[in-house]
Image (spheres, rainbow, N blue to C red):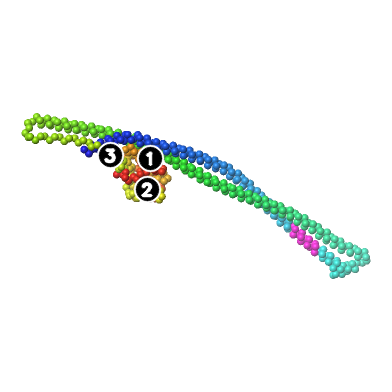
Amino acid sequence: MKSKILTATLSLTIGLSGFTYTTASAETLKDIQQKQAENHIEKSKKNKQVKEVQGEQDQLLKELDKLEASLKKTTGDIQTKKNEIAETKANIEQLQNEIAVLEKRIEERDALLKNRVRNMYENGGAVKYLDVLLGSQGFGDFLDRMISLNIIAEQDKTILEEHKRDKEDVEKKKQQVESQLASLNSKLSDLNSLNSQLKDNKAKKNKIMKSLRSEEQHLHDDIGKLVEKDALLADQEKAIKAEIARAKKEAAERARREAAEKAAAAKRAAQQKEAAERAAREKAKQPSRHSSPAPAPAPAPAPEPSYEAPSAARSFIFPSAGYVTSQLGSRWNKFHAGIDIAKAGYVPIHASASGTVARSYTSSTYGNVVFLSHYIDGQLYTTVYAHMRDRAVSTGQTVSQGQTLGHMGSTGHSTGQHLHFELHKGPWNVNKTNAVNPLPYIQ
Ligand SMILES: [Zn+2]
């Protein structure tokens, strides 16, 4: 009796499933294709932005090249000016030395002349002067002596004048060189300020370049994520199709088995009925010794109709041994889209239900992760097994409930060994909007 009810329920389930497969799967696949189209638009937008940013970078690089050339030139000019200044300074020093020598000579000559004149006209000198004159022998000698004294004084004077002229010349030259030095210094300061302007400009452009580079990096990251999303969507699409085919095949197999059981049961019932009738006939032939009537055969029990809706509740099993250390919900200001199960040691992880591997790969956040697509009673489910130590299944593979997918680990964004397990009613998406609490679904 119990088995007959079950048979009826199952036939009902298969009937319903056959109907819902097409509608639900069409919706799911349409949803995935919609997301793929959105991804495509987003990706071309990002690619366009990358081109723009790269164009800006090219322009900036050209400007930086020009700046670099200008900087090289001003740096060379500055060096030339510095050399010229050093030369001019050496020149000035030499002229200063010459001036000092001349000043010393002028001083000496001046002193000599003053001494001689003093000798000639001062009191003490006048005596000697007179002595010279008086010592002369006759007027001719006196005149000679007088003239020669004057000539000596004149000569001294002439030499002194020459020295003074020389000194004036050197001083004039020194002034010229000094004004040359001043002009060189002003040019050097102009060059230095130009150089620092160029350097400022270069620093600013380099800063812009840096921000453009980081913008480009972000865009590339975004595109990478979109490509990953695309791949995941494509894998999920393939897995869903394979999963539907698998579920249909299984349903057909079940239907065939049940039809055979039903036929066998009907055959058994017919045989029983025939045996009962034969027995009744045999009894009727024999003379009746007892008045009591023969007991009627028990009527075949009518199957009780079941209108219970097919439900995926308790279609899933715990994916691993261990304790649930974290529930689905808000955690550290973020939505925790699954449950965490922790256990020490080498802990195998099992497929929570039969399905198709949508993706088995290493993610930067999930670490070693397996995505399974399940088609149960016309509804698509996705389970996710993250942070695994290793993976034992590959993308596209069919798995049965309880099959080992890998082992518990702590890969990706994880702080200790545990399984992060997600259940999605529908396909997996980046915002995990289809995530549900898996616990009520587990047997
Ligand atoms: Zn978790």
Query: What label sits on residue 329 in the rendered view?
Result: 2
Residue in the picture at 51% in, 45% down: 214
Q: Secondary structure at mark 2?
A: strand
Structural crowding at the residue carrying mark 3, measured as other residues with C-alpha within 10 Å and reported as few (<14), some (14–19) or many (≥20)? few
Q: Is mark 1 within 8 Å of ligand 1?
A: no
Horizontally, residue 188 falls left or right of residue 252, namely right
The kind of residue on which mark 1 rests is Pro
Query: What label sits on residue 427 in the rendered view?
Result: 1
As measured in the structure, the alpha-carbon distance from the residue carrying label 1 to the one carrying label 3 is 26 Å
Structural crowding at the residue carrying mark 1, measured as other residues with C-alpha within 10 Å and reported as few (<14), some (14–19) or many (≥20)? many
Mark found first going from the N terminus, 2 or 3: 3
Marks 2 & 1, CB-CB < 8 Å contact = no
* Front one among 196 and 41: 41
Residue 125's spot in the image, x, y percent? 85, 68
* Front one among 112 and 53: 53
Structural crowding at the residue carrying mark 2, measured as other residues with C-alpha within 10 Å and reported as few (<14), some (14–19) or many (≥20)? some
Residue 189 seen: yes
The kind of residue on which mark 3 rests is Glu
Residue 249's spot in the image, x, y percent? 31, 34
Residue in the picture at 38% in, 40% down: 427
Point out the stretch of residues depicted in magenta: 98-111
Residue 249 seen: no
Mark found first going from the N terminus, 1 or 3: 3
Q: Secondary structure at mark 1?
A: loop
